[in-house]
Image: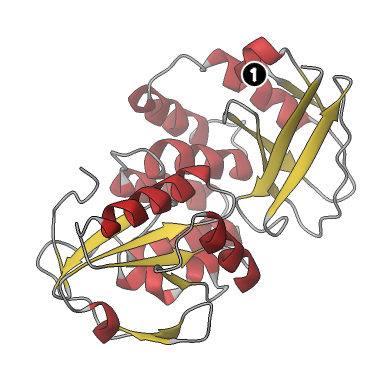
Amino acid sequence: MNQATFYAYSTDGVIDGIDTITVAGGRFEYEREIRHGGTLVIIFPNFSQIPIFVEPGTSVSISGDAARLSEVKVAGDDINEKFSGFRKMHRERSVQAMRQVTEDFIGSDDCNTEVALWLIQQYFLMPKDADVKGAVTMLNKLAQKNSNEVKVKRLLNLLNATGTVSAGDRIEKFETRDVHGNLVTDGTIAQDTCVVMTCATWSYESQNLLRRLNNLSHNHRFNKIMAICLDTKKEEAKGLQDRCNAENVIMICDTMQWESPLMRIFGLTTVPDKVVLVNGKVCNIDVTK
């Protein structure tokens, strides 16, 4: 790959928003100040993603063939080198198989918290057939190994608080402001059919869903869309809304990310995720068809 553009984002606040990385002459350098350890994700031109587990003061190198981006090697420290081998070993496995692999990894002596959290998110929470109950089980096992890990507790608390919204439930009262300062309450979305979804500047899948839902709303499939943006800055959410031509979407960004009370109220756990409301009650209908 002689020339290309990569993107970088973080799943846990190591960096804000999304960075652009330019490849020239088959090489690139990317330097970013970070204040705490976490996970940085590199997005390649074919939209495949590679996690980089970072710590302040460290550096890593990335090498590979453009024709086999899934085999890209990350070197420079023990965690990333081990995960490169792990990823290559299991690259052909199904989601169901990877859930068992994740359980085995968490139970092993080589378990690393950052890697385990990435695996739980990728194979339990992100797939269309998300297994929230299984994710909670994995997180409880991870917490037993490292009871002081704040990130594990935070995600565990979130999942324990969500997943309780089911068909027929009426959404509880709430009050917030959209990115333009307008008041938004449960009454705002209580009439007719409304889709509430999650999105983020670092999730292309969520942006595609936002565009698709916005187009469908123009054909009167439903009346309103409320998007909960999990970025840390309202300006990022405004930019996302503009890029997706979603001027009629109610865009919320309270900058609390995963800890936003709206995530609990609507039972949302991933990005992207969505729930359909009819007259203020949860309804099991697919508005994307």
Q: Is 112 displayed left or right of 244 in the figure?
A: right
Tag 1 secondary structure: helix
> Which residue is drawn at the image coordinates 24% and 81% (left, top)?
172
Would you identify the image quadrant in which residue 160 lies?
bottom left
Q: Is 35 displayed left or right of 96 in the figure?
A: right
Residue 66 higher or lower than 241, as above or below: above
Q: Position of residue 116 (x, y in %)?
A: 54, 40
Q: Which residue is mark 1?
A: 69
> Which residue is drawn at the image coordinates 39% and 45% (left, top)?
125
Residue 67 higher or lower than 116, as above or below: above
Residue 250 higher or lower than 54, as above or below: below
Name the residue type under label 1.
Answer: Leu
> Which residue is drawn at the image coordinates 81% and 60% (left, top)?
35
From the image, which quarter does the C terminus lie in?
top left
Q: Position of residue 236 (x, y in %)?
A: 63, 64
Q: Is 169 displayed left or right of 225 in the figure?
A: left
> Which residue is drawn at the image coordinates 70% and 15% (left, top)?
66
As drawn, the residue found furthest toward the left would be: 168
63, 147: nearer the viewer? 63
